[in-house]
Image (cartoon, rainbow, N blue to C red):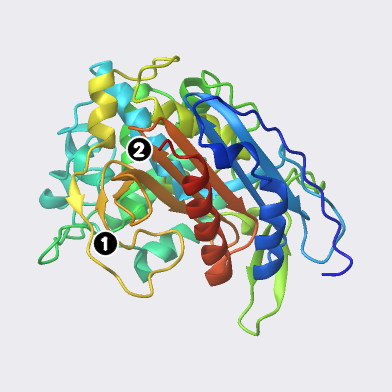
Amino acid sequence: MRNLVRCALVAVATLTMLPVAAKDFDLASYLETVRARYGLPSLAAAVVSDGEAVASAAVGTRVKGMAIPVTVDDRYHIGSDTKAMTATLAGMMVDEGKLAWDSTIGDVLGDAVKDMNPKLAAVTLEQLLSHMSGIPSDTPEMIALYFNVNGFDFLPQDWRRRALEAWKHNLPVVPEGSPFQYSNFGYMIAGMMVETAAGMPWEQLIHERLFDPLGMTTAGIGPQASTGIIDAAVGHRIEEDGSVTPMLWGPAADVPPLIAPAGAAHMSVGDFAKWGAWNAGGGKRRPSLVKRKTLANIHRKHVETPRIENQRPGTPQEGGYALGWGVIDFDWTNGPVLTHNGSNSMNLAKILVDTKGDLAIVVVTNYPGADADAATSDVLEMLYKTYAPR
């Protein structure tokens, strides 16, 4: 760590309506303290208030043990924080009359995937996006479909269809108590419904209908570094013996492409904050990606999430769930906020959106695990307490 080079490019603008404490807050120094305490390669964060960027900083290195400083323009992987973007794309299709929230898997995909289990075919888009479909969390059968060498022969949208074809005879089962089951496979199917309705692959749709209109110029899908170039904060894998492997690029540096709608986006911390700010505005600011009532439905709580002990970082642990967003009233927030964690097991990202206070906070690191979870949680809480309207 002694040889680690620190680099923080900080863009800070103070608004007159921000709390007094925010005016003197040194984000870069604070992040470096947290990064060093938890032993992370790098740590970055950004804050947007009333649609204006008020603070951003990035500290540390792109690769653990190497002196390759990060900048605020570095791309970070946001994992399952992609889910809210998939839900917004679905909302666009609803607004255009190409889908409805109660459109079923069978309605949209029945021609391509025949003879589905009738109960699976009856699952709705809204149930998929709120994790109430009865489709379970990643099972060994699903994981075998994700990590299938045959996938190298197919485009992602074809691979998704083949995965659903292989799984179509399963019966969705809603657990007792809360119907919530966090399902990446369900989001893959939702992505299939969206791309079918749009007539273009999900990967193209998210660029044309979300990244480009919001000016998210660093945003993309898959591993964050260009193959052969360490031009981003790369992820790291913690091995069973405790050693750490930098995952520079290639297929192993991200989730399999077929489940991209569930969590494969990357972008700079500034572009991530743009996305958060657009949501914080509740549909009042441009671009008008979806109708305000559609965004309100995406943001509202649809289901209570049961408390799950020792849940993996990146998955919900408490509160409620909207469509791609958690809804949680932390003991340090001014009421319920939208939030989500994202991890592909090599990186970790967190976002918080306070629509009442028109505030968005994002925190990212290129490291997984409990230390990354604790560090990003500390930063999220500190930045909310520092920048939230009083």
Q: Position of residue 119 (x, y in %)?
A: 11, 51
Q: Quadrant of residue 347?
A: bottom right
Expressed as whole percent of the image width and height from the top left, the position of residue 256 reads 52, 53
How busy is the neighbourhood of tag 1: few (under 14 within 10 Å), some, or many (20 plus)? Answer: many
Q: Which residue is mark 1?
A: 136
Which residue is drawn at the image coordinates 74% and 51% (left, top)? 59
**As drawn, 160 above or below 108:** below
Residue at image position (29%, 51%) is 329
Q: Assign a secondary structure to mark 2.
A: helix
Q: Residue furthest bottom?
A: 241
- The foreground one among 154 and 144 is 144
Q: Amino acid at mark 2?
A: Met
> Can residue 105 be seen here?
no
Other residues around mark 2 within 10 Å, as few (<14) / some (14–19) / many (≥20):
many
N-term-proximal mark, 1 vs 2: 1
What residue did someone put label 2 on? 192
In the image, taking residue 222 as reference, residue 120 lies left or right, namely left
The reply, left or right, for residue 324 in relation to residue 201 is left
Q: Quadrant of the C terminus?
A: top left
Which residue sits at x=47%, y=46%? Answer: 384
* Kind of residue at badge 1: Pro
